[in-house]
Image (cartoon, rainbow, N blue to C red):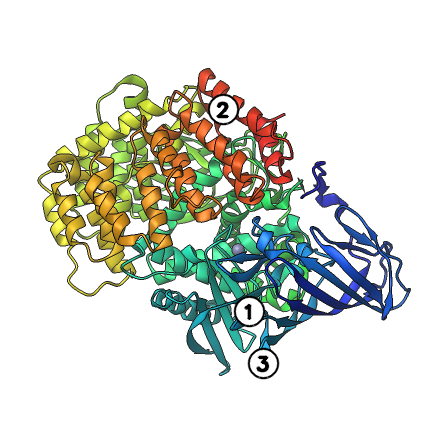
Amino acid sequence: MKDAAPKTIYLKDYTPFGFTVEEVHLTFDLAPGATRVKSRIRFAPRGGADDRRFFLHGEDLTLIRAAIDGKEVQPTLTAEGLTCDVPDAAFTWEAEVEIDPAGNTALEGLYMSNGMYCTQCEAEGFRKITYYPDRPDVMSTFTVRINGDLPVMLSNGNPVQQGEGWAEWHDPWPKPAYLFALVAGDLVAHSDSFTTCSGKEVDLNLWVRPGDEGKCAWGMEALKKSMRWDEEVYGREYDLEVFNIVAVDDFNMGAMENKGLNIFNSSAVLASPETATDANFERIEAIIAHEYFHNWTGNRITCRDWFQLCLKEGLTVFRDAQFTADMRSEPVKRISDVIDLRARQFPEDNGPLAHPVRPESFQEINNFYTATVYEKGAEVIGMLKRLVGDAAYAEALDLYFARHDGEACTIEDWLRVFEDVTGRDLGQFKRWYSQAGTPRLKVEEDWQDGTYTLTFTQTTPPSAASPEPQPQVIPINLGLLGPNGDEVKETETLEMTEARQAFTFTGLSAKPVPSILRGFSAPVILDRDSSTAERAFLLAHDTDPFNRWEAGGALARATLNAMALEDAAPDAAYLDGMLAVLRDDTLDPAYRALMLALPGQSELAAMQAEAGHTPDPRAIWTACETLRQALAQHAQDTLPRIWETCRIDAPYRPDAEQSGKRALAGAVLSLITRLDGGALAASQYGSADNMTLQVSALSCLLKAGKGQAETAAFYAQWQQDRLVIDKWFMLQVLQAAPETAAATAKTLTEHADFNWKNPNRFRAVLGALTGNHAGFHAADGAGYALLADWLIRLDPVNPQTTARMCAAFQTWRRYDARRQGLIRAQLDRIAAQPGLSRDTTEMITRIQGN
Ligand code: ZN
């Protein structure tokens, strides 16, 4: 059990470890309930260190024996590790501990998943494997021997030797302990190879459980594309003889970049056309790339301490987004990322969990693997690139790799390479790393005698994390359109640094229409009172695909808010604009599909709250339903034709072209279902030969309150496939009407296949419930109570996943007094649980705002 007393760790308290680790030798004698781990570690006092206390982290370990230079010692054991008197010069530490992988349900450290041993060490899991300075700034080479009776036994680096019942691995690249990994199990490999740019041959293996061999091809393709791309775009070559990926069913996150041995949640790597959707394929491609790119941004150059997490995560998310944009469509990727940012990061940045991209304190680091660190962290890098330009960005990255290879770095190191390359002072820019909250950008315009002036005002709401926010550097990409829709000024990056700042444009023959924040050039909330006519104009004419999409979204938000708050009728400008987009066959189908989607209901609630209203989730849901119905009727003559143009005769490929067509067809099907009572969806379900078509048809039917027979048939067909059954659980909750969502979720938690200790399955039901906005926030509080019940149950088993899911309550202050009371009661109930984990305690306390 974790230490219950909450202790806050501060960035300002950083001190280096008093010793260096020269090499680490580990021997594992595997046994499910009692694995022995022997360590032999060479320590040397670090020159210049003033703290020579020898403290090693350790949790849930049974110490069998410890020795220094071969002589037994009796260390002092503490709740968090051990201390020991050590010599003044270099010495060899040896320890033997016993651990219990089979009893490890937290999925951190060494644990078991379906009879297979695997590890998860980031952030602080290695201390559950042996006593060690478990901090990212302590780097060492590792040699690992695994003794066990399993056919496949893997660790980091290159294979040294293996025999009956044992295998030995050596990783020549010094690394922090959080990148350590071990896997042992009855696994089969899907193998391939890659020749690097300098001609080295690398063995590639994707290890899976027998039966999953048919779901490996896409992940392997994605890996090879990623390796090539990182060579071509960033000049980064792979640096070991092998690259192994393992799929495991029980995993808290998406995947983990352990050096040479990436471990993946099976949902983030396994795919076949029959069992995975286009969206799954795209996500897999992105996650494979992400973990692979970490080899340089994270592993070769790592973080000095966990406050610097965005150093590796923000940069690696930025790199994987560039990769996806290159593999697929740049505007589609950008729009998808902004949808995600608004859905996950904005609520965090504007609620009780707000924290800077580089936090300054934490109690449990696992709670800081957030949308702010990852996604806003990537936005900050995008802004930096926009400000310095592509050439300087490339030069700065080269310098970063050259200067810091093999080091554990900070955000200061990162910014310094940009300052050195460009000569710029990035002092003010650095506020993006230290200041929480989403800046609001207000725009006023003025037109006089051929001179057009835009005046921007930026304000960031104060938060507990940043009580006095200062003006940030905001790159504002701007273009101007003439009255006939022609672009009169191409995109330029305006650099805003003041709280209020004006930009003037001359030589214009008529008052232009501004296209502001093109490509979403900064993660801010643009506050502009533009007219319906102007939005419709931009939707029709903007040359920037992002802002064209944004104009459609602005029309949708305006009409939905008016419908929900004032009982207004659907806006004809929105309906006409969407119909024009739908019919425009020159537009990429994937882009049209994004256009047709409505803004998220939670996002609408946030906007209404910000404007001083009390959002009613049921009214927002009704507005969305009404608008979709109106659009279906408005477009009814066009829908069948579009549906036809999306037909695909070629064999299934999850590439951008085919998935775009299927996405548009799915969007059209959801509208047609509102008109034909589900006839087309039922026929699509019956003839579907891939999971994308199966899921889109079933979703439409469930949404329409139908599909009972299909739901049963789906279960019967896929009962043996965990990943598909996760979808079965999820869809039923996600598509349920507000009044029935909680009851549906509750019934599903009673299903024999609701294996709640598996994070994917838990999220499939409870995560889907929180994603059904009106259902989760149903007035009777049943959604809140059900989630709380399950969080309470999961916490002792898996604190990390429990704590992450507490975030569903973070928006409680937006809603009416009754709902606030209901949520607070659940928060209090969770907080009162005896022995609540440090993870969940920290999250609940922050959400309560006490
Ligand atoms: Zn990452």
Q: Is residue 406 above or below residue 437?
A: below
Q: Nearer the viewer, residue 11 or 124?
A: 124
Q: Is mark 2 within 8 Å of ligand 1?
A: no
Query: Where is mark 3, residue-wise?
Result: 163
In the rendered image, residue 208, in percent from the top left (x then y), is placed at 43, 66
Mark-to-mark CA distance, 3 and 2: 57 Å
In the rendered image, residue 698, in percent from the top left (x then y), is placed at 23, 44
Query: Where is mark 1, residue-wise?
Result: 260
Counting other residues with Cα less than 10 Å from the Cα at mark 1, is it few (<14), some (14-19), or many (20 or more)? many
> Nearer the observer, disc 1 or disc 3?
3
Q: Is residue 149 above or below residue 477?
A: below
Q: Is residue 486 visible?
A: no
Q: Nearer the viewer, residue 106 or 468?
A: 106
Q: Is mark 3 within 8 Å of ligand 1?
A: no
The local secondary structure at tag 1 comes to: loop
What residue type is disc 3 on? Gly
Q: Is residue 142 above or below residue 491?
A: below
In the rendered image, residue 288, in percent from the top left (x then y), is placed at 45, 62
- Closer to the chain start, of discs 3 and 2, is 3
- Closer to the chain start, of discs 1 and 3, is 3
Total labels: the figure holds 3
> Nearer the observer, disc 3 or disc 2?
3
What residue type is disc 1 on? Gly
Residue at 58% from the left image edge and 59% from the top image edge: 119
Is 253 on the left-hand or right-hand side of 658? right
What residue type is disc 2 on? Ile
Query: Where is mark 2, residue-wise?
Result: 823
Mark-to-mark CA distance, 1 and 3: 21 Å
